[in-house]
Image (spheres, helix red, strand yellow):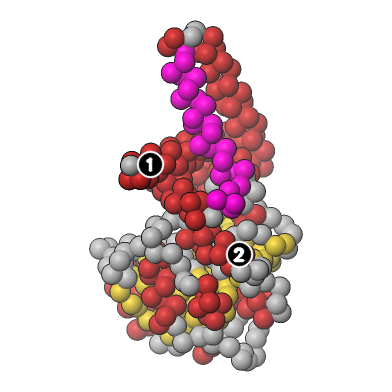
Amino acid sequence: MIKHSNHLISLIVPCFNEENTIEKLLEAIRSQTVPLEVVEVIIADGFSTDNTRNKINEYRIKHPDLNITIIDNEKKVIPAGLNKAIKAAKGDIILRMDAHACPASDYIEKSVAALTAGLGDNVGGVIDIRPPNNSWIARSISVATAHPLGVGDAKYRWTTKTSEVDTVAFGCFYKSTVDKAGYYNESLTANEDYELNARLRKMGLKIWVDPAIRAVYFSRPDLKSLAKQYYSYGFWKVRMLRMFPDTIRWRQALPPLFVFGILMLLLLSVIWFPAFWIFVIVSLLYLFILAIGALKPAFTQKDAALFIGIPLAIMTMHFSWGTGFWMSLLKSGKKEK
């Protein structure tokens, strides 16, 4: 337990229609090992149409010991909400969190300790992905979105070692750092964390991940919402790469290349029959790799449904990400003409 702190910590949360998880987040913040008097919570709400605001206000009335402020996010996009929250923050340390996540009880303590120790200029931890409900597909999605076949070398989802990385999920940084960097890019509706961290790295600053810093993140409940999420990731990745082309990683290049290859094989098979058999072989090999990848978690968790659900979820992630990437390229190409 921290006895005192020389810093005021501003925990910023972009939010829209999170009535199912917002109370869990607030309770997790209130249960932190740091004294509540050194923490303020600023929620940038994009005019939620569900019961989110009422739940926040009810919690604030019941627990006046936690300093909670709600501000309006008129632009209704995450980076705009984050920027407005940062500008409203009174703390010299900013800790970014999502409304569908729950930090471990020592999350703030360990994040601030790593930051003030100078381990990194933006410090984050590993997210433990959990299903929002107990349906077989929700369970499968929660495993797939932390699986190396689904997320590649995104260390903030699975690493067990401290290291310098290209990005973190929820960062902890000095307010002065983001003042110098120029805040989040409001032209992006996804990849805003990666883009900010790319700028920080260009400034010679360090992004640091520590697996001792943990937070639970609730994954999407079904394949439709998962597809929408990863389509958005792929779509906005193109916009980000136009600004920082040298930040492309193999995990980001493979899905669009795979989607392109599969599409070309299908088109070629119309005029060149051997292309059809190549398509069949590639598809079967892909499915075989996904099935092998699903074996261990299905066996470890004693959940046979994962053997089917994990490949379905990873396929959804790959094809949605790749399709979003190509659609963004096509649309940006038309605008340039």
Looking at the rendering, which quadrant does residue 105 occupy?
bottom right
At label 1, the amino acid type is: Gly
Q: 189 or 158, which lies in front?
A: 189
- In the image as oriented, which residue stretches furthest toward the left? 49
Position of residue 244 measured from the top left corner of the image (x, y, whole percent): 54, 55
Q: Can residue 4 be seen by looking at this rendering?
A: yes
At label 2, the amino acid type is: Lys
Rendered view: 285 above or below 170: above
How many numbered circles are shown? 2
Position of residue 260 measured from the top left corner of the image (x, y, whole percent): 49, 30
- In the image as oriented, which residue stretches furthest toward the front? 337
Position of residue 216 measured from the top left corner of the image (x, y, whole percent): 55, 61
Q: Quadrant of the N terminus?
A: bottom right
Q: Which residues are magenta?
A: 245-269
- Magenta span dominant secondary structure: helix
Q: Can residue 25 be seen by looking at this rendering?
A: no
Q: Is residue 240 left or right of residue 127?
A: left
Q: 135 or 35, which lies in front?
A: 35
The crowding category of the residue bearing disc 2, from other C-alpha atoms within 10 Å (few below 14, some 14 to 19, many at least 20), is: few
The numbered dot on residue 202 is 2
Q: Secondary structure at mark 1?
A: helix
- Please report the residue visible at 37 percent of the width from the left and 81 percent of the height from the top: 69
The numbered dot on residue 333 is 1
Looking at the rendering, which quadrant does residue 223 occupy?
top left
Q: Is residue 14 left or right of residue 140?
A: left
- Measured in 3D between alpha carbons, the distance from the residue under mark 1 to the one under mark 2, in whole angstroms, is 27 Å
The numbered dot on residue 256 is none
Q: 288 or 265, which lies in front?
A: 265
